[in-house]
Amino acid sequence: MATMTSSHTFQPLLHRIADEIASMPGRGRPADYIPALAACDPHRFGMAVAELDGTVYGVGDWRQPFSTQSISKVFTLALDLAREGDTLWEHVGREPSGNPFNSLVQLEYENGIPRNPFINAGALVVTDRLHTRSGDAAGTLLEFLRAESDNAELAIDKGVAASESAHGDRNAALGHFMASYGNIGNPVPVLLDQYFRQCSIEASCADLALATGFLARHGVRADGTRLLTQRQAKQINAIMLTCGTYDAAGDFAYRVGLPGKSGVGGGIIAVVPGRCTLCVWGPGLDERGNSVTGVTALDRFTTLTGLSVF
């Protein structure tokens, strides 16, 4: 194993990984249940690494905005946890689900308490609670991402949001079901609008690698202020490791060995605590909803550098 000793080797390393990705035969398929995402070219690929001081390296389509989708759940979780602390965990669990991300099955067994914040039911609870505290969950998230990425141009893709809303019956069912247990505080249509807008924020690999930096800095934002306690940052990293890639988290931990969070837009963010953050993008997904080229690229990164939590 080649172990990286200094940050100036990130750029040639990224080019090496991109060259390997270019020769991959099978790249998966874009998410076709959201029509606005179905047209993405699975041959697109980008990767960025951001150091703790904000220095960012990239390769391929690393400046190309894409739909963040479930990656947004990490930031919404951090923003709500910063506001209400451990009270949040009375309303959402911290265990892997073992079921698809939009499953209704577990909710009835567990009395409307979602298994973790990254399945859709759990993310709806977190968005609901952030909206209650902020008055605009999606707007608060967008403001945070703009600040951390130093990119004021980040925006919500209204076409994707409309597409999700038109095909959002399962999320509506999850919201109403949890509301029947008293675990949703806002009107479900208001919550769904916030949630679809949240998931429809467009950002690039560079933007998201930079925005994730507070988790590598143990809760400290890009401007030096503290968003989370060290304990809270540890909690989010732990949940990313065990629950961040739908029902493939065990395989992701096995291959990559980093806290990570994927989205069906083809992006994956990952954290090397105390060192750097990464974002990869490849629109082609596997059967569990994770980017095929993204997982492979992160696997190669940790293998070639030795940068892993294990």
Image (cartoon, rainbow, N blue to C red):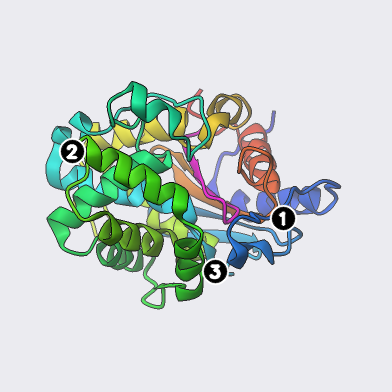
Q: Residue at x 21, y 56 (%)?
A: 187
Question: Tag on residue 15?
Answer: 1
Query: Is disc 3 surrounded by few (<14), some (14 to 19) or many (20+) residues within 10 Å?
Result: some
**Residue 158 seen anywhere in this rendered image of the structure:** yes
Which of labels 3 and 1 is toward the front? 3
Residue 257 seen in render: no
**Mark 2 and mark 1 residues within 8 Å of each other at the beta carbon:** no
Q: Is residue 214 left or right of residue 277?
A: left
Q: Which residue: 41% across, 26% down?
A: 106
Question: Mark 2 or mark 1: which is in front?
Answer: 2
Toward which corner of the image does residue 110 lie, by quadrant?
A: top left
**Circle 3: residue type:** Pro
Q: Looking at the image, is mark 3 or mark 1 earlier in the sequence?
A: 1
- Of labels 2 and 1, earlier in sequence is 1
Q: Number of marks in the image?
A: 3
Q: Mark 2 and mark 1: span between their CA atoms?
A: 51 Å
Residue 61 is situated, as x and y percent measured from the top left of the image, at 65, 65
**Foreground: 299 or 9?**
299
Give the residue pinned by disc 3.
65
Q: Is residue 97 magenta?
A: no
- Stretch in magenta: 257-269
Please state the horizontal and vertical placement of residue 277, each as a whole percent of the image: 46, 47
Residue under the point 36% across and 76% down: 152
Question: The residue under label 1 is which amino acid type?
Answer: His
Q: Is mark 1 on a helix, strand or loop?
A: helix
Provide residue 169's location: percent of width, then percent of height.
Answer: 45, 53
